[in-house]
Image (cartoon, coloured by chain):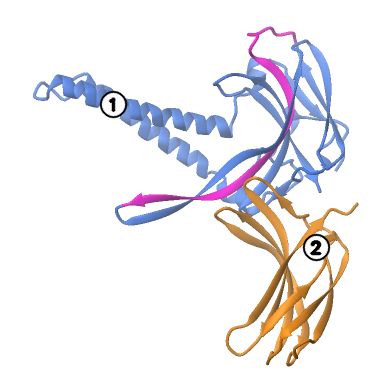
Chain colours: A blue, B orange
Amino acid sequence: MRTPLLTGANRRSKFAHIPPDHDPGPQTLRNQGGSTLWEWFTAFVGSGMVVGGLFVAAGGRGSKFNPWEEAIGGLVFAFFGAVCVAWAYSLRRKRRPLRLADRLPGAALAVDRDDARRGERLSVTLTLASSNGSADDESLEVGLVCVEIYDYQVVAQTRAGPVYVRQTGEANAHEDWRRVERTAGDQSVEFELPRDAPYSYEGDCVSYAWRVSARIARTLRSDPRIDHAVWVLP
Amino acid sequence: MKLELVLGDQAAQGEKVTGRVDVVEGGASRSLTLTLSFHEQTQSYSAVRYSSGGEIHTGELVTGQPVDFDFTVPAEAPPSLKSKHAELYWELAITSDEHGLDTHARQRLEVIARA
């Protein structure tokens, strides 16, 4: 399907990494919702640990316990709870990145088409409503990214024996980022889809997803971004 | 029984492929079946997403006997692909149906995008 201009803000797809006209594969369907539950569970348990740990550290269990032991034990417990909360937050941010529009109001990303073959070129337009200055180390970039989504097995040792857990990992199979200016108006960038890179694929234990993104690249923090999924044909 | 597949390494989407099974050691076989399948493979998991085939020979196989076959790679076949954590590949398998354990011969076929 070819459309002259599709803007990221106007497009709606249940699965963010797939353009609207394409169907999800078994892996995508299997993973939908599961990660959300896991995030909330980890956040809930972690929050409980933080509250419980601080309660104990503050001497909440009464004077019959050694205050130093209570303080140290409680703080250690609260620390691990905080790690759980941070882990849950990072999972959520990985699944739902910060929105670029929150940092750059009115930012929009447009791609000349949703489907393209390897070797063809994609024309991308980033529109900014106003010039936004920011820290020098936070560059605004437009990129073409292919993510490899693959299943792997994790073995957890328990008292009842090993437990095998199916996990899904992600790795960039291709990425090409170009720095753009933070000036109001349209800026166009052209990308060539490499002939030897993966094509879009929705599988059972591996998938390949392509997207065009605009991001504010930040050090040690998640990048606010806006994505536009594209389907790359072989 | 020992079988050997003689086949080119590469084929394009929609291309007709010809090949041969060489019977290195013959024996009693009920039939010889050819199967073309498409596989996904990661370090821990694998899946067969497509499989198609049929009988290419019936009856006993004699040592030295060639069995010719041909098939067409599906026009929409996903090309073979290898990345850091996974692989998509096509495989051709020959199975000799025998009393007891069957004999197999397999070979990968690199499927490339139509030019």
Q: Which chain does tag 1 point to?
A: A
Residue B106 versus residue A49 in the image, above or below: below
Q: Which chain does tag 2 point to?
A: B
Given the current orientation, which residue lies at the most extreme left position?
A64
Residue depicted at x 86% and y 34%: A121
Apparent side of residue A11 relative to residue A120 in the rendered image (left or right): left
The magenta segment is: A130-158
**Where in the figure is residue B109, as x and y percent of width and height?**
77, 63
- Give the spatial CA distance, label 1 vs label 2: 60 Å
Residue assigned mark 1: A76
Q: Is residue A143 magenta?
A: yes
**Where in the figure is residue B1, as x and y percent of width and height?**
66, 85
Residue type (three-letter) at the residue carrying disc 1: Val
Number of disc labels: 2
Residue depicted at x 17% and y 20%: A68
Residue A164 versus residue B91 in the image, above or below: above
Nearer to me, A133 or B31? B31
State if disc 2 and disc 1 touch (CB < 8 Å): no
Residue type (three-letter) at the residue carrying disc 2: Asp
Residue B41 versus residue A110 in the image, above or below: below
Helix, strand or loop: magenta stretch: strand
Label 1 element class: helix
Label at residue A226:
none
Residue depicted at x 58% and y 88%: B100
**Where in the figure is residue A7, as x and y percent of width and height?**
78, 28
Residue depicted at x 57% and y 49%: A151
Mark 2 is surrounded, within 10 Å at the Cα level, by few (under 14), some (14 to 19) or many (20 or more) other residues, namely: few
Nearer to me, A183 or A175? A175
Nearer to me, A126 or A143? A143
Residue assigned mark 2: B9
**Where in the figure is residue A88, as x and y percent of width and height?**
46, 32
